[in-house]
């Protein structure tokens, strides 16, 4: 009797483990103390956070689509690269950077929306989750091919949105580029959160993601909510792409986001795949960790950074299989 | 006057010769029933007789053929979303609350298809379910089974439906909670004139609530009549209603 009632209690529960907040607090304390003791450490932390911000935008885009359809959109990075080329093209035609930025966001939204309608919806109607995953891989190849076909495979140079200025604060040099990247990526995720939390459409999108059948019964057009989700994800991807291309270490080429997509995926998994907040924290952690590893551990070459991200992902999953902010799902048997 | 609408003028809901199937299994065979404006109608029958499928056929959450009309309009090709927008609120078995969202968000979703301020709707809902007001920021998944059933009902009230489809509202609830649920259903029907189509295992309480009832047997109507009539016929009572 008690066993049965216990099971019913736990069919749905939020993660309430104390390990996660403690680990995050520990990480923050470590970074703050390190930054106070060494200015190089502070600089590396900030540029790591900037990388993490780019991963975060893309990771949240992945989470958005995963929550609604339980599918990892492998084409997310390629779509982001495509929209970054659009921004480059607009700037090349003479638009100012921020005007091109805004136009690109609009185009990305419309493009993502249309892509879901044309490429995903027919597949989803007929097949299952796996079919949609395959379709997204096909889309990845198709979009990267389209980029090469339209703009060629040579590297383009995307102008940076911020002047190459360095701020000095107590012996620590911060580049405006890094600070701007952090600010824009965090702000875009925050605006998205506000949208989901406080608008009617946002609420309907959340309802459609968690209980599609019940959502239809209150009049929500679930398939349109999925298209909207793809539009929003493409917008976030565009932010990630434009911020990435502005970094001096990333070149605008058709495969620009391939590596970043893998980091974003690792970040989303670390965060629990269903939690945008988890994805952001996972992304910032990966960005900082990799940057510190690269500058402080002599044998960690740039080629080893990708495996390092996966080691972090594995370590988190070993301790908490549902990810940092994932919900533990207990099925009633 | 145009050609008499399938002989069911005045009915709010009319189903005629409706078939429904799950893959190979035929769940409804030439089922016909009507619900009049402001009426409470019960659907009774054994497990697998097609009670839940009847409600699903109306909200189009199962593939079906036949003639389905609501308030003079055909339900034929409408999906569940636009059926809901016509004024049919379907509270499915297992309640269909959004467990991950808060109580308040669940209620707001009830009024999703409508524009304008929800203040009056919230006030109306809180007269039926006063306890919901204080719990509006609580996660719906943490409510008890009875509370979730009430929340599902409250969300349906937010939809301002002309017809309420209730599927097994008593399932898994304690007797006191069951009578509370049915008291609210009757109150809704009397105060707002909401018509109710009720599917229930519990024949006794549904006959006490409904004015008419249909008894289903393998996907079609075996008996129909007023509740008093059905309750008084011993043959029906013992073979179909089980008391």
Image (cartoon, coloured by chain):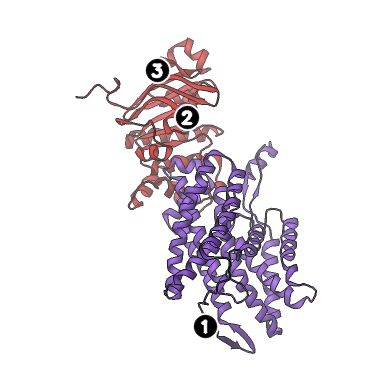
Chain colours: A purple, B red
Q: Pick the residue in front: B211 or A251.
A: A251
Query: What chain does mark 2 sit on?
Result: B
Left-right relation of B195 to A204: left
Residue contact at pointers 3 and 1, CB within 8 angstroms: no
Query: Which residue lies most toward the top here?
Result: B235
SS at circle 1 = loop
Query: What chain does mark 1 sit on?
Result: A
Residue corresponding to mark 1: A163
Please give the label number shown on residue B238: none
When the figure is inspected, residue B72 is found, relative to residue A150, above or below; the finding is above
SS at circle 3 = helix
Q: Calculate the distance from the C-alpha at mark 3 to the C-alpha at mark 1.
A: 84 Å
Residue that appears at 74% across and 65% down: A308
Image quadrant holding the C terminus of chain A, namely top right
Residue A28: x and y in percent read: 67, 72
Residue that appears at 60% across and 77% down: A248
Q: Look at discs 3 and 1 and give the one toward the viewer.
A: 1
Please give the label number shown on residue B63: 2
SS at circle 2 = loop
Mark 3 or mark 2: name the one nearer the start of the chain: 2
Report which quarter residue A277 is drawn in: bottom right
Left-right relation of B14 to A44: left
- Badge 3: few (under 14), some or many (20 or more) residues near its Cα, within 10 Å? some
Query: What chain does mark 3 sit on?
Result: B
Total numbered badges shown on the rendered structure: 3
Q: Pick the residue in front: A74 or A253.
A: A253
Residue B55: x and y in percent read: 45, 29
Residue corresponding to mark 3: B228
When the figure is inspected, residue A231 is found, relative to residue A331, above or below; the finding is below
Residue that appears at 36% across and 51% down: B118
Residue B50: x and y in percent read: 50, 23
């Amino acid at each position: 009797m008690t066993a049965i009632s216990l099971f019913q209690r736990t069919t749905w529960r939020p993660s309430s483990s104390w390990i996660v907040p403690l680990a995050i607090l520990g990480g923050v304390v470590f970074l703050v103390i390190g930054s106070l003791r060494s200015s190089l450490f502070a600089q590396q932390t900030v540029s790591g956070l900037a990388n993490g911000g780019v991963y975060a935008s893309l990771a949240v885009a992945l989470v958005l689509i995963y929550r609604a359809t339980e599918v990892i959109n492998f084409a997310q990075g390629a779509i982001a690269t495509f929209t970054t080329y659009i921004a480059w093209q607009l700037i090349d035609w003479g638009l100012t950077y921020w005007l091109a930025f805004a136009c690109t966001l609009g185009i990305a939204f419309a493009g993502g929306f249309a892509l879901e309608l044309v490429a995903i919806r027919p597949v989803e109607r007929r097949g299952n989750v796996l079919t949609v995953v395959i379709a997204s891989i096909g889309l990845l190849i198709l979009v990267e091919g389209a980029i090469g076909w339209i703009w060629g495979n040579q590297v383009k140079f995307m102008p940076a949105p911020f002047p190459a200025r360095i701020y000095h604060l107590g012996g620590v040099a911060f580049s405006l580029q890094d600070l701007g990247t952090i600010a824009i990526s965090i702000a875009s995720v925050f605006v998205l959160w506000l949208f989901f939390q406080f608008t009617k459409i946002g609420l309907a999108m959340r309802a459609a993601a968690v209980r599609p059948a019940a959502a239809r019964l209150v009049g929500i057009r679930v398939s349109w909510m999925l298209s909207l989700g793809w539009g929003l994800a493409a917008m976030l991807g565009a932010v990630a792409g434009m911020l990435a291309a502005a970094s001096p270490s990333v070149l605008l080429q058709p495969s620009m986001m391939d590596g970043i997509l893998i980091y974003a995926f690792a970040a989303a998994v670390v965060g629990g795949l269903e939690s945008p907040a988890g994805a952001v924290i996972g992304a910032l952690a990966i960005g900082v960790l990799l940057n510190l590893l690269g500058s402080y551990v002599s044998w960690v070459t740039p080629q080893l950074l990708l495996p390092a991200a996966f080691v972090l992902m594995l370590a988190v999953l070993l301790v908490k299989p549902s990810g940092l902010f994932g919900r533990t799902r207990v099925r009633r048997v | 006057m145009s050609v008499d609408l399938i002989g069911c003028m005045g009915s709010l809901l009319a189903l005629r010769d409706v078939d429904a199937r799950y893959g190979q299994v035929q769940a409804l065979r030439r089922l016909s029933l009507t619900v009049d404006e402001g009426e409470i109608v019960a659907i009774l029958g054994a497990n697998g007789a097609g009670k839940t499928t009847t409600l699903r056929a109306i909200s189009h959450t199962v593939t079906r053929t036949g003639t389905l009309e609501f308030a003079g309009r055909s339900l034929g090709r409408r999906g569940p979303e636009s059926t809901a927008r016509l004024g049919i609120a379907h509270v499915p078995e297992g309640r269909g609350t959004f467990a991950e969202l808060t109580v308040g968000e669940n209620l707001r979703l009830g009024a999703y298809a409508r524009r304008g301020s929800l203040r009056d709707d919230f006030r109306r809902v809180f007269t039926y379910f006063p306890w919901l007001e204080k719990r509006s920021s609580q996660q719906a998944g943490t409510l008890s089974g009875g509370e979730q059933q009430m929340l599902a009902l409250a969300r349906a009230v937010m939809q301002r439906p002309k017809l309420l489809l209730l599927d097994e509202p008593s399932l898994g609830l304690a007797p006191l909670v069951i009578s509370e649920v049915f008291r609210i259903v009757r109150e809704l029907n009397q105060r707002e004139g909401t018509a109710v189509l009720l599917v229930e295992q519990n024949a006794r309480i549904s006959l006490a609530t409904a004015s008419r009832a249909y008894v289903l047997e393998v996907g079609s109507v075996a008996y129909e009549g007023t509740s008093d009539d059905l309750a008084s016929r011993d043959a029906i009572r013992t073979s179909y209603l089980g008391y």
